Each structure stands twice: as C-alpha cells, then as structure tokens.
Amino acid sequence: MIWLSTEEVAELLGYEKSTIRKKSANGEYVCRYISSNVGRGGRKMEILLESLPEQAQRAYHNASGESQVVVNTTHTSTKEQRKKGELRALAITEYRKFSKQCINEGIKKKTEIMDLFVKKWNDSNDFQISKKSLYDWMKKTKTGNVEKLVDKRGGYNRGQTTIPEKYSKLFDSLYLQQTKPTIESCFREVQLQANINGDFLPGIKAFRNYVKNMDQALLIRAREGKKAFDDKCMPYIERDYSKLHPNQFWVSDHHLWDIFVRVPDGKGSWKLERPWGSYWMDMRTRKMMSSIIRTESPNSDVVLCSFGLGVEHFGIPNGVRLDNGKDYKARDMFYPEGHYIVSEEDEKKIFNSLAANLQIEVTYAIPYNAKAKPIERVFNTFEEQLGKKYPSYAGSNAKKRPEDLKDLNIMDVITLEEFIVQHNQYVYEIYNNSGHSGDAMYGKSPNQVYADEPFTIRRASKEVLYFSLMRVKGQRTVQRNGITFKGIHFYNDNCINYIGQKVTARYDPTKPEILYVFDTNENFLFIAEEIQKQGWDLSAEDYQRENQRKKIAKQKALNAYTADNVIRSTESIGDRLKRQAESIDPATVAKPKTIEVVRNEKIEENIKRISMTDVERNYEDVLVRNAARKMGISSKQKALADKFKQDMLNYAMTTAKHA
C-alpha cells in the first residue's frame, strides 16, 4: 500500500487540498491520520493511493520516473463546466451594464449597486449567484473572458497526463514515419511493450493529446517528406508582381489533366487516355499565352511548339522561368550559357541557342518547389472550373476518384478533339477574361491587365523567328543514302558531294519530313527530305524515279570531273618513269665476304637433260633403266639369301632345344 499526502493527491486530481480533505472525510477516499508537527492538532492526513481512481494511480506510477507531460488544450473542461463559465461571463457583462445605468441614475455606492444586481439576476435566472462569487469572478477577468471563468477542477484525466519518456520516444519512432501509421496502431505497440515491462501507461487519449502538442513542422517533415515540409513550413520570398510588366517573364509547365478522354486505339475501337497540357503564362498578368493539348507525354518539341505559338501572337518575352525537367533544358533551346556546343572536341564550333538568338533571359525554378512555379496554382483553378465538369473526372489520386467513374460508358467520354475545342474556349475566352484575385491584379482579368499595363513588344522578322525556332541536333555523318535522323534517312542530291563529312541539322517540329543541313561552322548547305520507303512490287515509275535520282547524283559528283587521257599515254608514262629513276640516287652494292652455293640436284639434272639431244637423252634413259633392273635383281637375290639364312638359323635353334 502507498499513502500519499493531501498535497500529492490534490496535484494528481487537480483539486484544492480542502476538497481532498472533504472527500476523504465523506469516505470517498480511504484515509488515515499520522502524528506530525506540521499538521493541524499534531496530526496529518494521508490518503491511500489504491483508493484513488485508476487513471490517477497510473499517473502516479508513471510520474515516478522520467516522463513526457501531455497538455490537453481542447478538452480541459466538461460541457457543464463550460456552460457555467459562459453564464459567469454573462453575469459580469450584465453587471457592468447595470452599474453604468445605476451611476447615471445617481446611485454611486458599489455595494448597493451589487445588491440590486444580484437580486435582479437571481429573480430572472435559474443560475443563482452571490455577491462574493461575482467579486471573485471579476478578479479573474475584468472583461468577462470565458476561459478564465471555466472551473477546470476534477480534470486529472483531461488536463495533464504523463507518458514515460522511454515510451514517448518509442511512440515517436513508430509514429514519425512517411508510411503515416495511425495513432491507434502505434499506441498498441507501445502498450504491448509496457505490459511486457510491467509498466503503467495512460490511455490512448493521452497519446492523441501528445500528438496534438507535437511540433507541426516536425510532423510534416517526418510523415509527409521534404517536399511537403518545404511547401508548407519553410519561409519563402514574396514577390511584388506590380514591379513586373507584361511580357517581362513567361513561365511554363506541363499539366496532366485529371480527366479521361476518348481516342482511337488503332484497332477500330476506342481507349481512354489522360490528356497532357503544355502551357506558357505571362507572370505579370497571369494571362495564358499559349497551350498544346495531346495524350502523348511532353517533350522538348512540344515545349518549343507551344512557345512558338505564344511568340507568334504576343511577341518575344524578355525572360522565361522554367521547370527543371530535361525537356526544358534542351541545349539548343533555353541553354543558360546561351550556346549549344555541337562538337565537344572542338568548342569553337557552336550553335547559338534559341535563348541566345532571341536574347531571352533564362531562369530555372528551384526543383520540387511549388511556390517557385506560380503556374501550378493556375492548374488547380483549371481543374476546379473545367475538369470537374466532366463525367470522366478521375481526381488527382485514387482516394479522390468518383465511385461512379467505373460505371461510365466509354462512348459517354469526351473525345480528345472535343476536349481541345472546349479547353481552348475556357482558357482563352473565359479564364483570360475573368477577374483574378492574385497579387497586383486588383480584381481585373488577365486580358484587362495585359491591355492596361504599358510595355514594349519585342518582335523579330518572320525569317529570323522561323530560323530561331528550329531544333538543332548534333553532328551527323553523310552516308551514301543521305543523313540518318531518328532512324529515318533524309536525302538531297548534293549529299553525294559530302559523303563521309560531318554536318549538323536543324528541323521544324511541325515539319518533321525536312532537315536543314549546315556544316560545323553553321554555314547552310542544303535541305534534305525524308526518303519514302518503297514496297517490294515496284512499278516502272518507281524504277524510273530511282534511276533518275542515281543519274542526278552521278552528275553532281562527276560534273567537274574530266578524264585526262594524255597522262595515260605510253610516252607520258615513259617520261615520268625516267624522271623518277633519275631523281633516285642508286645505293652502293655491297660486296659479299663469303659465298654459299645453293644446290638442287633435281633442278640441275633437269637443266642437264634440257641441253642434251634426243638421242643422248634416250641413251641415258636406257642406261638408267638397265641399272635399275640390275639393282632390282640384286635386291631380290639378296632378299632370298637372307631368307635362307634365317630359315636355317631357326631350324638349328629348334633342333638344339629338342636335343
């Protein structure tokens, strides 16, 4: 058993010490009296811990070690206590009004005014008050603040609870994860560990309050990640849009719409796709300058085409603010250094980028920072005002996806072409002409601000603009069938004069069948066109066209060539050989110190026979044959003699063995 002083129990339960004594005297808690020099009458009250409510017992045991205090900021009082606090505040307010009225009528004495007010209040209200209560309430708050008048006693399990430090740390390690586990699941694990250790823990409400009192920035960083932390918690620079002028900066980004559109599947039916939009917006006016809608993923060609559309209608911006994606960082477009190096081995051979040609300042946004790209906020407006109108709206994630989407008939889904028409009508006729609440917009529409604000439009000639908006690709080697680009051959009759040479190419994304070919010093050479592949059943016209192409190529290559027949004459060759021989100094012939004769009897014999007459050669052949015949007879006789000797030897040895 554990006995506690009235001070300790009062701290646990949140009561005054006098209230604890009264409750103990009434038998609500088990108590005893012990001798003491500090108590009344030489004795001191102690209360049995086990007679206190269970949660008070847990709070006591947890407080015996290191603990984390959890303050409940939203439930520190009951509804009844809150109601009484509001009535007390009302009484103070009514008293101040009544007091002013009495003073105006000539009643100056405060006690008299107080008596009159208390009587009047108690006659008309069920909530009875006294002069002392009213004085006490006015001491706590002169203005009638409800929070200061709420009685929060008896709130040991509502106001302050303790969680042992080791369990609060365990809870932190479980809860502060980007998988976002629930408080309940983490609490169960902590509770299991506490049961294993035999420790007491407060209930789950204490852990909920503990989470409410956590540092919100820490919660976001731990459970939502760095990007969410930067977007929601980190301070950011506030820009003054009024200091910009139209066309000073354009900003661009891609947006994947939260709807489905219907497109052909190439098999005679339909399929669903989410459309991509590539946009350019003027930062000062929020005016949407241009856009391209398609179902294919964005790339640098789409960025260039959409930019070209905006420039064609509204002029060239002074600068652009871009996303960090690779489609915006193509070196021939918005390269920050202003030049696109064709050959890294020779950095002098460079092409000016689009930004350099049109004198555009390029700025890239901070990666993964939504506030650095204000156009992203416009996309939310687009979805709210247009995207959610369609039955094929799918939401930005699976949780926001309408349940009836799965029941939608594919033929009820808008086609891509229809969506483009309605999209353009909304963006350019509705959004651009609607009032805007953004900074320095003053409620005007983007078109109004664009028309009202003075600025200078930058223009370039049609030819310069067209040339600048072409894409630049790296070096290509001219082959017999022209230039290979994206797996396609492009050919010009002049290609034959540059076979094996390095060239560069520009192309217009809207005319992919044409290449503009330059040398590595940016000098224009010719225009190459895509070679159309032929089938296997060629007609006479096809053969005639190909033969004509070969004929032209041959003429181009050999146009300046004439064969020099004189230089190939016998006299010319003899003269050149003579001059060549005379120009060479003959080397001194070395004298050998020893001579070794190489003999070949067979060849020497043949040479000897060649010099003989037929009679001499026949006579010699007869002699050779006779000698060979005699040699054969002698060899045969010798073989017979050797055989006879061997037989006799074998016979003699056999006889000796039997004897």
Image (cartoon, rainbow, N blue to C red):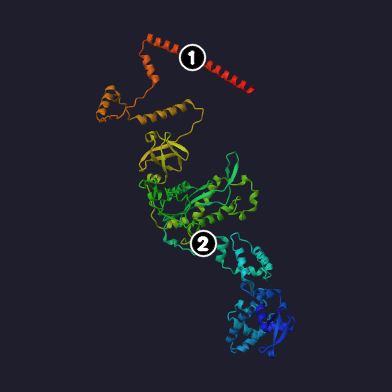
SS for dot 1: helix
Q: Earlier in the sequence, mark 2 or mark 1?
A: 2
* Residue 246, picture quadrant: bottom left
Count of all numbered marks drawn on residues in the image: 2
Q: Position of residue 139 (x, y in %)?
A: 60, 83
- Tell me the quadrant of the picture where the C terminus can be found: top right
Q: Position of residue 150 (x, y in %)?
A: 64, 77
The residue pinned by badge 2 equals: 230
Where, by quadrant of the figure, is residue 167 drawn?
bottom right
Regarding residue 551, the answer to whether it shows in the image is yes
Query: How many residues crowd mark 1 within 10 Å: few (<14), some (14–19), many (20+)?
Result: few
Residues at badges 2 and 1 in contact (C-beta under 8 Å)? no
Q: Is residue 143 above or below residue 192?
A: below
* CA gap, disc 2 and disc 1: 117 Å
**Tag 2: amino acid:** Asp
Circle nearer the viewer, 2 or 1: 1
Q: Is residue 47 above or below residue 371?
A: below
Residue 634's label in the rendered image is 1
